[in-house]
Image (cartoon, helix red, strand yellow):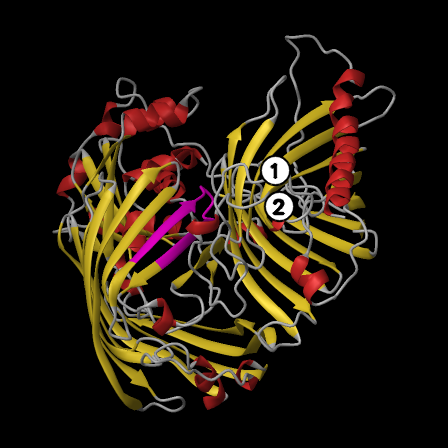
Amino acid sequence: MQQTIVQKSIRGFAILATFGFAVPALAQDAGPDAVFNIPDRPTLNFYGVTGLIDMPSAEALPDGQFTVGVSNFGGITRSTVTFQASPRLAFSFRYTGIQDLNLAGFETFRDRSFDVRFLLNKERRYLPAVSVGLQDFAGTGIYAGEYIVATKTFQEVGPLPGTFKVSAGLGWGRLGSAGSIGNPFGGTRPEFEQGSSGGEPSFDQWFRGPAAPFAGVEWVINDKFGLKAEYSSDAYTQEVDTSGIFTRRSRFNFGAEYQVSDRVRLGAYYLYGSELGFNAQIQLNPKTPPTPIRTAPAGPVAQRPSRASQPQAWSTDWVVNENAPVILRDVMAPRLESSGLRFEALQVTADSAELRMQNLRYNATSVAIGRAARVMAEVLPPSVETFRIVTVENGLAQSAVTIRRSDLEALEYDAEAAGALLAVTGIGEAAPRLENAIENEEYYPDFAWSLGPYITPSYFDPDEPVRADAGLRFSSEYRPAPGWEIAGSVNLRLTGNVGDSVRVSNSVLPPVRSNAVLYSRGSDVVLNDLYVSRQWKPGNDTYARVTGGYLERMFGGVSGEVLWKPVSSRLALGVEANYAVQRNFSGLGFQDYSVATGHASAYYEFGKGYLGQLDVGRYLAGDFGATFTLSREFRNGWKVGGFFTLTDVSSEDFGEGSFDKGINLTIPVSWFLGSPNKRVVSTTIRPIQRDGGARLNVPGRLYEQVRSGHRNALEQNWSGVWE
């Protein structure tokens, strides 16, 4: 019987592979020097990664692509987020629900898993794309599998329109459970362990055990329609043999897909000879916003009159007028404000001027620099040749950008204007304070408030995967002087079900995060935070902050931080010390749990938008360890990153998930609105929130405030200086 199954498997694979690899014989010969066009919008499979139907392909998504895939068949629903972190490397996080799977005592078994895949070879005229992948490499292992797959694209096949993509590969684990051809790398593979808490990489099973071939063809008929067929190597042992949630009669799957828009694709499928399925794919790229960001034209740079023709205009007699700085301030401030900038201070001499200002509108600081330089060229007397522009963020002077006025005038219409201006521009340190300057006293004290809707989601409850509370949030800020802030926010919950969860913490650690449900049950009116903060620069390269009050929903206390970050350095070092007391579930009081916590941090800019961060210290539950974070930031403000925390808490004491890990996502509001705006929407997706590795949430940490105005961030978006 077993021999018959293997023989049928090999025959089925041979039929599909023969069809697939016979395609090049039908393809038109484009000649050795012809350019080979590969479609730049790979489709997703039921696992939410580039692929066929249930099997992967070797294609990589466009660099930076962010995708969401939702699929369903046979009582199995998979929701996957994938990020193409580099041209070759992609990561995925998946949440799966399997109805009637008799595991862990739930009607619907829910599982979280991570994938990683690497493009070994990009497709060329005669060579296929080749990728290697780890599926569910750090989850419970129910979907654990590894694969090596190749994909080749063929265009204009005989009389058939469109493009054919042929994929074939070898799978292990789940992807090697049907039609095995042996154990090519030797070793035994551990079986799926029911009740595993997951969360740790399964090094002992990667590419071990039986391997099986898979293959498939995707026919991209045109920009809208596509057809797929594949031979699957997944036996669905747990779902079919153990639980019987569907009947698997065949190893062949078929499907049709329709491209609804540039970002949305839908598909319908017939799987395993018995099941109908559907797949919805959403693909976004931070580099291509839905609405192009339109910035109001800045206008040309004001040109000074010729010194030879109007020598009197270049006179420096204005310097002796004691009211000159005040007059310049009064003229300059409203012009800056109309450009989304706020005048802070001005120091001026006969041939130079330093302007300090806040950027209230633009994600790219370079745009603010260019707007400020134009205003200075318009207002300042012709004798002022050197402009020093200092951006100030919450009282912290970031860096000083020095531009010669004559360079600004001469290079505006140069073919290489951005690069040419950067070559003659200085970016250096800014003194903590600008002595003997005219300040804009109208903005202090400054009070601002807002009232708007809020949504607080809660993910991955086994009984209800997505819960949320929603209502109104009132926020206010009072700044009595530069660097000082008194701020707070209050939530009025109008609806929600986060508090309905019965999953109350059973942690053996102090419940510093896992009792979040009890906070949601506490009251419909909640004081989120209320604090006083003071931040300043002790030196040209150092920054400091002290914050006290209700720091977050669960903890109050005192926090202090010092950061060393030279303007031109990729490296920054910081130290933070906190004393935190746990807040009551409702009201303004505190519980009897307190902890001294803090971290030493190192930040590094690798270039091309990649940022690394290492935090070492003590966490809220009293555990010691380190958090590793790697992020990618795009020029328009999108930021996607992953992190994990390892502490002296064992995986058994930590509980489900084994250690803290997750994904950070920041999206600028301007990406949606199509107009300049500094606001962002941020969220953190964790497989599960436990108590180990939990860090205090402190408002206004220094690094992100400082970095946006330093050399690397300015150079990355320097072309914006002419916008």
- Residue 691 is covered by the magenta coloring: no
Q: Amino acid at mark 2?
A: Gly
Report whether residue 343 is seen.
Answer: no
Q: Report the residue at 13% width, 42% height from top.
A: 320
Q: Is residue 617 left or right of residue 91?
A: left
The secondary structure that dominates the magenta segment is strand
User: Residue flagged by tag 1: what amino acid is it?
Assistant: Leu
Q: Quadrant of residue 315?
A: top left
The front one of 596 and 76 is 76
Element class at badge 2: helix
Residue at the disc numbered 1? 170
- In the picture shown, does residue 388 fall above or below 696? above
Q: In this picture, which residue range is highlighted in magenta?
A: 627-644
Relative horizontal placement of residue 589, taking residue 247 as reference (left or right): left
Residue 568 locus on image (x, y percent): 22, 38
Which class describes the residues within 10 Å of circle 1: few (<14), some (14-19), or many (20+)? many
How far apart marks 2 and 1 lie (CA) works out to: 7 Å
x, y percent for residue 606: 32, 39
Residue lying furthest right: 159
Q: Earlier in the sequence, mark 2 or mark 1?
A: 1
The reply to whether callout 2 and callout 1 are in contact (CB within 8 Å) is yes
Q: Residue at x 88, y 21 (%)?
A: 159
In the image, residue 103 above or below residue 264: below
Q: On the image, numbered disc 2 is attached to which residue?
A: 176
